[in-house]
Amino acid sequence: MATHLVWFRNDLRVNDNLALSAACRDPDARVMGIFIATPGQWRQHDMSPRQAEFIWQHVQSLHAALAQRGINLVIHEVDNFDDSLAHLKTFCTSHNVDALFYNYQYELNERQRDAAVEKMLGCEVICQGFDDSVLLPPGSVTTGNHEMYKVFTPFSRAFIKQLHEGLPECVSAPKARGAALETQKLNAFDYPRKAVDSTLFPVGEQQAINQLRQFCRQPVADYQQQRDFPANDGTSRLSAYLAIGVLSPRQCLHRLLKEHPQALEGGAGAVWLNELIWREFYRHLLVAYPKLCRHQPFISWTDNVVWQQDEAQFIAWQQGQTGFPIVDAAMRQLNATGWMHNRLRMVTASFLVKDLLIDWRLGERYFMSQLIDGDLAANNGGWQWAASTGTDAAPYFRIFNPTTQGERFDAKGAFIRQWLPELNDVPDKFIHTPWLWAQKEQLTLDYPQPIVDHKQARIATLAAYEAARKSEEKQQ
DNA sequence: GGATCCTTGAC
DNA sequence: TCAAGGATC
C-alpha cells in the first residue's frame, strides 16, 4: 500500500485543492497531511500577527475537515525553511512515504526550498507540485515574443483569450477514506498572534465559500460603481482567504461565471474578474523577475532616488497622525483590522512615497506586518505601482493629492468619521481640511496639523525623481 | 517600423 | 491641457 503525504502550505482547504486531490486519486493509498510552521521564516517575511492568527484558525479547521474524511493532518513546528527540509526528510523516512504532493508557492525563498526538497528526497520519494494558487500557470501567458507582459492591459486581454480556449476546472473535495478520526487538540505556533474580527473575516472554508457566493450574486455586478468608495461595503474582502488558500482563484472564477456568464465578454462582473487577473499578473511577474522578491525596483534608475530618512514622519504615517484625514483614517483601519480598502492602499502608499519621499520598501514592509491578506506578489506590485518603480507603474510625475482623493472618494467624510472620532464635529465642508476649519473657528482640534505641505512636497519629489533619472543617464 | 495604447490623475 | 516613454502588435 502506497503512502501519500500532502504538504499543506498556502492552500488551507479541502475543496479544489489540486495537491490533495491528486494524492487521493489512488483509492488504496494511505493519505496523510502535514503542515510545518516556520516562525523564523515568517518573521523574516514580516508576516502579520493577524495573518498568523488567521492561518492558525484555518489550520485547525482544516485539521477537523480532514479528520472527518479519515485523513490525519499533523502540525509541526521548526524555525525556518532550511529546518523544514530536514524535518520533512525524517518524517518521510519514518512514515515510509512514497510520494509527496504540494502546491507551488512562487516567491523566491519558497521556490528555492521546494527545489531543495526535490533534490533531497531524490528518487526515494516522488515529488509532485501543482500550479494551484493561480488560474493559469506563470509563464503560460506571454507576448508574441514568448516573453512576460510588462503592461497589464495586453496581459489581461491575452489572459481572457486563453480562458476562452479552456477554463481551469475545479476539483472536488476528497471523499472520506475511512472512519472519521478523533480530532486532537493542537498546539499553537510560537509566533505572535492578534485577534481577527470574525464579523469581517468569519473562520472556515465553508464561510469563505458562502462569502464568495454572496458577493457573486449581486455586489460583484455593482463592483465597478461601488469599489472606489471606502465607506461602502463594495469590495469582496476575499483577499484574506485567497492569500492563505482557504479559497482558490478557480472557485472565484467559476462562481462568478455561474452568476454572471457574460463576465468573460465584458459583461457584469468583468471588472472584478480583472482584479483576479491583476493578482495573476503580479504572480506571473514574480516568477519572470526574481529580483522583485529581493526588494529591488523593476525600473532600476528609481533606486537612485534619495529618500528622506525621517523617522518621526514615518511613525506619524504608520499611526495615522499625518493630519490628512483620508490617509489617517485608512492607516487606522489597517492597524485596527488588518485590512485596508484598495483605493486607500493607493492613497496611503502614494502619500508615504510622494509626499513624505520615504522609501517605498519601508511602506511595503509595514503593510506586510499589518495585513491579514499579506501577499508578497500583490503587496510588492501595488507598492511599486504607487512608487512609480514597477512594471506598468503610474508615471512618476503623476502624484496623488491626498485632499482631492478624499473629496472624490469620501465626499462627506463618512469613512473618515468612522475612524477619526476626534473629527466628529468638523462640518462636511472641512472634513478633508480640518486645519482650515480650526483656523476659521479659532479652536484647537485634538488632531495633528498636516505634517507636510502637499504642494511643496510634490515639487520636491518631482525633483528627486528627476535627479535620479538624470544620474542614470550620466552613468551611461 | 509606425501607430496606438497605457487602472485607478492633477493643475 | 498636461505629461515620458516604453510596450505591443
Image (tube, coloured by chain):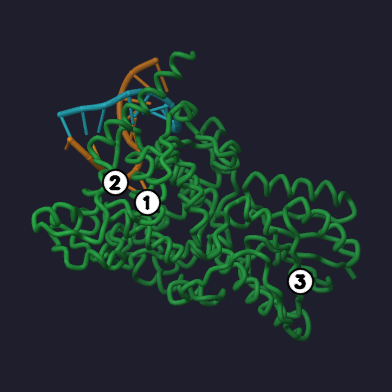
Chain colours: A green, B orange, C cyan
Q: Is residue A270 visible?
A: no
Residue A133 lies, in percent from the top left, at 59, 57
Q: Separation of disc 3 and disc 1 at Cα?
A: 43 Å
Q: Quadrant of the N terminus of chain A?
A: bottom right
Q: Are marks 2 and 3 on the same chain?
A: yes
Answer with the quarter of the image where residue A270 lies: bottom left
Local crowd at mark 2 within 10 Å, few (<14), some, or many (≥20)?
Answer: some
Q: Separation of disc 2 and disc 1 at Cα?
A: 8 Å
For image coordinates 17% across by 67% down, the residue present is A425
Q: Earlier in the sequence, mark 2 or mark 1?
A: 1
Judging from the image, mark 1 belongs to the subunit labelled: A
Q: Nearer the viewer, mark 2 or mark 3?
A: 2
Quick check: A113 above or below A192?
above
Residue position marked by numbered label 1 in the rendering: A316
Q: Are marks 2 and 1 on the same chain?
A: yes
Residue A436 lies, in percent from the top left, at 14, 52
Residue position marked by numbered label 3 in the rendering: A74
Quick check: A262 above or below A196?
above
For image coordinates 39% across by 19% down, the residue present is A470
Nearest the viewer among A34 and A461 is A461
Residue A192 lies, in percent from the top left, at 60, 65
Quick check: A225 above or below A316?
below
Nearest the viewer among A175 and A391 is A391
Q: Earlier in the sequence, mark 3 or mark 1?
A: 3
For image coordinates 27% across by 68% down, the residue present is A421
Residue position marked by numbered label 2 in the rendering: A451
The three-letter code of the residue at mark 1 reads Ala
The three-letter code of the residue at mark 3 reads Val
